[in-house]
Image (tube, rainbow, N blue to C red):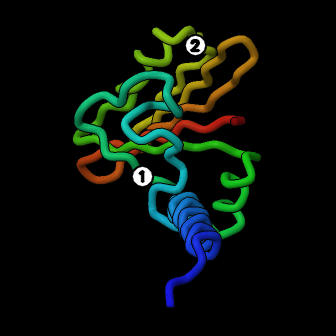
């Protein structure tokens, strides 16, 4: 006895819906939950320059939930050596104006602005690498 076509169609639609939900949910459970568009900088602002490894903060579940709800936005990238200003060029080319330029030993910070879109750019030396974090409102 074969199942009715409507039953088969219903099961297929359910499986497709479950697959779509799983794909979206997997992002929020994974290590790279904060990277909205892989291979790009700041969710599509520019192609990601070579030599950068994306990362996301390993903060609490509440922070991850904040990013998921769209209340906060952050992207992090690690690169070899001490290169604190490595990602400023793509932001400038996209129209961001640098408001500050604060360098301390092993740390660098800048605020960037484009038409009221204010971003914080922070680089930290971690061993033989630089960790750059860009944060702002979505």
Q: Position of residue 69 (x, y in %)?
A: 74, 53
Rounded to the nearest angstrom, the CA distance separating label 1 from label 2 is 23 Å
Q: Residue at x 53, y 33 (%)?
A: 43
Q: Which mark is residue 30?
A: none
At a point 34% along the width and 51% down the height, the residue shown is 126
Res. 17 visible in picture: yes
From the top left corner, tell me how far across and down residue 10 is, in percent: 63, 70
Q: Residues within 10 Å of mark 2 (few under 14, many from 20)?
A: many
Q: Is residue 82 left or right of residue 55?
A: left
Extreme residue in the front direction: 1
Kindly indicate the quadrant of the structure image that contains residue 87. Answer: top left
Is 70 placed above or below 116 here? below
Number of numbered discs present? 2
Task: Find residue 100 and report its horizontal and vertical position in percent.
Answer: 60, 19
Query: The residue tagged with tag 2: helix, strand or loop?
Result: loop
- Secondary structure beneath dot 1 equals strand
Image quadrant in which you'd find residue 28: bottom right
Give the label on residue 96, or none.
Answer: 2
Horizontal side, residue 68 vs residue 97: left or right: right
Q: Nearer the viewer, residue 88 or 62?
A: 62
Are there few (<14), some (14-19), or many (20+) residues within 10 Å of tag 1?
some
Q: Which residue is mark 1?
A: 55
Q: Nearer the viewer, residue 27 or 6?
A: 6
Query: Could you say which is closer to the camera, residue 115 or residue 39?
Result: 39
Would residue 58 be seen by someone viewing this image from the given angle?
no
Q: At 34% from the left edge and 42% from the top edge, which residue is drawn?
A: 130
């Amino acid at each position: 006895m074969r199942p009715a076509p409507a039953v088969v169609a219903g099961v297929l639609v359910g499986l497709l819906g479950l697959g779509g939900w799983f794909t979206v949910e997997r992002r929020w459970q994974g290590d790279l939950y904060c990277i909205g568009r892989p291979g790009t900088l700041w969710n599509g602002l520019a192609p990601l320059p070579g030599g950068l490894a994306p990362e996301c903060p390993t903060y609490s579940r509440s922070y991850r939930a904040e990013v998921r709800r769209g209340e906060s936005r952050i992207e992090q990238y690690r690169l070899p050596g001490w290169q604190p200003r490595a990602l400023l060029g793509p932001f400038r080319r996209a129209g961001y104006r640098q408001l500050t330029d604060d360098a301390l030993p092993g740390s660098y910070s800048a605020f960037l602005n484009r038409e009221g879109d204010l971003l914080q750019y922070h680089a930290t030396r971690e061993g033989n690498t630089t960790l750059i974090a860009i944060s702002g409102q979505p």
